Image: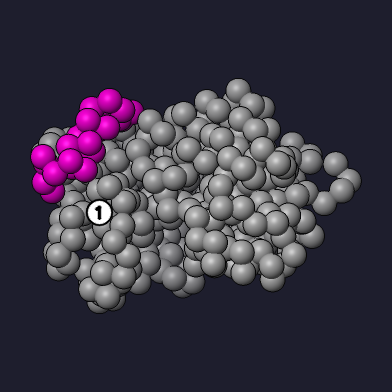
Amino acid sequence: MSNPLSFAVVGAGANIYNNHKQAIHALGGNLVALCDVSADVGKARADEIGAAFYSSVETMLAEMTPDVVSVVTPHPFHATIAIQALEAGCNVLVEKPMAVHVAEADAMIAAAEKSGKKLALSFQQRLRPHVRALKQAVDDGAFGRIQHIDMATAWPRTNVYYQGSSWRATWQGEGGGVLLNQAPHQLDQICHLLGMPSKVTAWARRKLFDIETEDTIQAMLEWPSGTLGSVHISTAEGWRPERVELVGSKRYANLEGTTFTVKQLSSDFTEFITTANAPFAKPDISDDSFDLPQGAEGHTGIYENLQAAITKGTPLVADGAEGRMSLELANAMLYSSLTGETIDLPLDRAAYKAMLDELIAGTRQL
């Protein structure tokens, strides 16, 4: 495909729209259409770039078939719009989270497979050099046996934030709180590095805000390999830097913001415990580092990768199956909290949807 790809953005009134517009332009793509239910905002933005404006996805797809439809609407609309675009013959890029519940993600993946088109997720944090270095080191076995992962961060919000839009932090409007709005990138990092856990125990809580949904999540995870993990993410804390800590039998790494600390043990601890001749012996620990890969980051990197996937068959940074992982994990955390049970994955789709319907109807409370 020698000509520039054509793009349409659905949800052009969103705050994240400019990130997509800039990435498409950096790519040399042709942004041919914008779509939004708000004609005032959407048409003004379309006029700025000389693109067609539509207030209806159905009308847009009846009149044109752009190479890529980028879905940046509130997430309750992601599944419907993505499936419509895929069935119309378009490739699709979806903002996080992929959908509200995992059965919707299943339907999106099935639609992509049937259409033969690409379904990509905008998990641009996978392209951060430090995250790429961690992923490569894990895949190469540099950590030895992965023993523990710890993820923690705060996304401080205020009452003004939650009162600013009637859909925020409601079961009908979002299908969750911090888990679906602020946490997807962190949950994706966990799944990206280690794959899906097999068990989840979680506590979803309202710590400060008078909202329907959770403002804080605390969870414990277990993988089939025996790796354990912990997660803490909140909008009800004033400050906590984003941090992911990875403990292996050979190495330790801590990524806090852009501060990257790596330590190496003198020998694999699983072997050290059998060969050491003293009860309290410890292996020597030395500073270590990983080479940081180069390449485009952010939304620009995601769009470059999508273009390469469409034109050259390059693997996507995050395809539908990869994007589904963090959503399933978020759903499982909420389900665990509301049932008081440890949840085995994969998640029971029908049981979760039934619980979510009860939350939306108000017959069940967090």
Is residue 35 shown above or below 263? above
Please report the bounds of the magenta region as a residue range: 345-366
Identify the image quadrant of the N terminus.
top right
Secondary element at tag 1:
loop
| Location of residue 68 with respect to 255 vertically, above or below | above
Which quadrant of the structure image shows residue 120? Answer: top right
Horizontal and vertical percent for residue 219?
A: 23, 49
Give the left or right position of residue 330, taking residue 113 as reference.
left
- Based on the displayed image, in which of its 4 quarters is residue 273 positioned? top left
Q: Nearer the viewer, residue 215 or 230?
A: 215
Residue at (69%, 67%) from the top-left corner?
Answer: 47
Direction right: furthest residue: 2
Report x, y in % for residue 31: 72, 57
**Which of the pair 107/143 is nearer the observer?**
107
The percent coordinates of residue 291 (x first, y second) are 61, 61
Is 365 magenta? The answer is yes
Look at the image and tell me whether residue 260 can be seen.
yes
**Residue 98 seen from this side:** no
Q: Which residue is mark 1?
A: 170
- Give the crowd class for mark 1: few <14, some 14-19, many >=20 residues within 10 Å: some
At 66% from the left and 51% from the top, the residue drawn is: 8
Say if the magenta span includes residue 161: no
Q: Nearer the viewer, residue 151 or 110?
A: 110
Residue ID at (87%, 48%): 3
Query: What amino acid is labelled 1 in the image?
Result: Thr
> In the image, is residue 105 above or below residue 130?
above
Viewed as shown, does residue 191 lie left or right of 273? right
